[in-house]
């Protein structure tokens, strides 16, 4: 075990000092693209400023024959796209490298860090099993950063895609000061758990609760009578546990992919469930999901207006006040500050939201 006094020391001579806090940069939508796809790559410059995170995907959905092309394509995009990536950019640049047991992961890192490490904000690591996977990436990134002369550390994001990873979620979150957050990987996790679903995220009509049967005048249950059915969320436990682990370590939880691109209604519902539980963003597999994510993971104008009223009414935060017939106290204030702080972060990068939130504030 690394001594606590050494936790925030660089793991390589000349590497940048690890962060003591992970910045709360807006990342409502992490939009995936294949850097080896010329059509997708051509659209990237126009997307800068319009999406919080652009992620060059090197893993799943990239065929083995295209792995090198995808890696080289991401290097070109990082080098040539104005305003993409880095601490001052409105759009972060992330990448999902290949899994650590693949023949491509090492080359992914040794190619990307020297070439575009100064613009690369986060490295997403798939199929993380435990802290040992993060330790490996942590040390390697430190060595590459030192060699490349980088002055800021690249952060690490882990995908929970295995039962073992889920069981080790707390130690994964605390494995490195580089840890930026976690994403749910529902398809691989479902397979590893032997769940009986072939969907990528979302609910399942078979996972339900049914209303109790009505009883006749003799008190006998009428089993065959019509009864209401309520579909349940397969991922509620997993997301809630992931949110708790992230909150404990000061990093950020994300919902992962929603595979049914056409069902925008169910997509929005699933994103909203994740938002309400504490996730800060989600993946986007198609441009139409970006707008959904931006809408869902931004607090509404009404929520922000109410939160500001509570903050103003609470003064120094002690005691309790009555507002619109409801008691507001210290716990209420803490909840409202979450909304207000998020609104301020989003307003800094989203002019339309800034105008809406400002108007709500002036009305109050």
Image: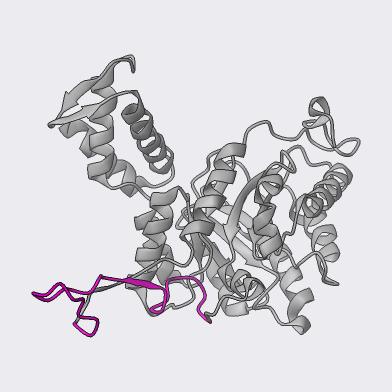
Res 19 quadrant in image: top right
Provide residue 25's location: percent of width, then percent of height.
53, 43
Magenta span dominant secondary structure: loop
Res 39 quadrant in image: bottom right
In the displayed structure image, the side of residue 145 where residue 242 appears, left or right:
left
Query: Toward the viewer: 13 or 258?
Result: 258
Task: Please tell me whether residue 318 is drawn above or below residue 225 in the rendered image.
Answer: above
In the displayed structure image, the side of residue 94 where residue 46 appears, left or right:
left
Name the residue at the front extreme: 218
Identity of the residue drawn at 67% across and 65% down: 162
Res 202 quadrant in image: bottom left
Task: Please tell me whether residue 123 is drawn above or below residue 176 in the rendered image.
Answer: below
Provide residue 281's location: percent of width, then percent of height.
48, 54
Provide residue 297's location: percent of width, then percent of height.
40, 52
Identity of the residue drawn at 70% across and 52% down: 168
Identity of the residue drawn at 56% across and 68% down: 186
Task: Please tell me whether residue 279 is drawn above or below residue 306 in the rendered image.
Answer: below
The segment highlighted magenta reads: 198-225
Query: Toward the viewer: 35 or 280?
Result: 280
In the displayed structure image, the side of residue 129 where residue 44 appears, left or right:
left
Provide residue 130's location: percent of width, then percent of height.
75, 54
Count numbered badges in the picture.
0
Query: Toward the viewer: 356 or 138?
Result: 138
Q: How is the image coloured?
A: one colour
Q: Quadrant of the C terminus?
A: top left
Q: Is residue 201 magenta?
A: yes
Q: Quadrant of the N terminus?
A: top right
Q: Is residue 278 magenta?
A: no
């Amino acid at each position: 075990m690394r001594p606590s006094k050494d936790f925030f020391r660089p793991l390589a001579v000349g590497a940048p000092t690890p962060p003591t806090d992970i910045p709360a940069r807006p990342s409502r939508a992490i939009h995936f693209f294949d850097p080896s796809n010329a059509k997708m790559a051509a659209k990237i410059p126009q997307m800068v400023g319009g999406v919080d995170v652009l992620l060059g995907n090197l893993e799943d959905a990239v065929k083995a024959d295209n792995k090198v092309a995808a890696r080289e394509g991401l290097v070109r995009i990082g080098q040539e796209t104005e305003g993409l990536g880095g601490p001052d950019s409105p759009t972060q640049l992330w990448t999902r490298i290949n899994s650590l047991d693949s023949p491509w992961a090492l080359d992914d890192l040794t190619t990307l860090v020297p070439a575009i490490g100064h613009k690369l904000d986060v490295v997403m690591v798939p199929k993380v099993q435990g802290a040992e996977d993060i330790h490996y990436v942590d040390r390697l990134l430190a060595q590459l950063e030192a060699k490349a002369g980088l002055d800021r550390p690249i952060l690490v994001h882990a995908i929970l895609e295995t039962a073992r990873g889920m069981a080790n979620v707390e130690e994964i979150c605390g494995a490195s000061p580089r840890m930026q957050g976690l994403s749910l990987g529902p398809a691989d996790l479902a397979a590893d758990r032997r769940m009986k679903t072939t969907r990528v995220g979302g609910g399942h009509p078979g996972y339900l609760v049914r209303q109790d049967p009505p009883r006749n005048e003799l008190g006998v249950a009428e089993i065959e009578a019509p009864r209401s059915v309520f579909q349940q969320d397969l991922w509620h436990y997993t997301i809630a546990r992931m949110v708790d682990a992230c909150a404990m370590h000061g990093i950020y939880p994300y919902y992962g992919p929603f595979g049914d691109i056409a069902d925008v209604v169910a997509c929005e519902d699933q994103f909203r469930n994740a938002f309400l539980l504490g996730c800060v963003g989600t993946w986007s597999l198609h441009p139409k999901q970006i707008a959904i994510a931006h809408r869902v993971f931004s607090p509404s104008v009404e929520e922000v207006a109410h939160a500001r009223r509570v903050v103003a009414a609470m003064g120094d935060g002690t005691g309790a006040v009555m507002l619109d017939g409801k008691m507001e106290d210290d716990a209420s204030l803490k909840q409202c500050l979450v909304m207000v702080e998020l609104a301020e972060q989003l307003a800094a990068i989203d002019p339309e939201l800034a105008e809406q939130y400002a108007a709500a504030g002036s009305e109050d």
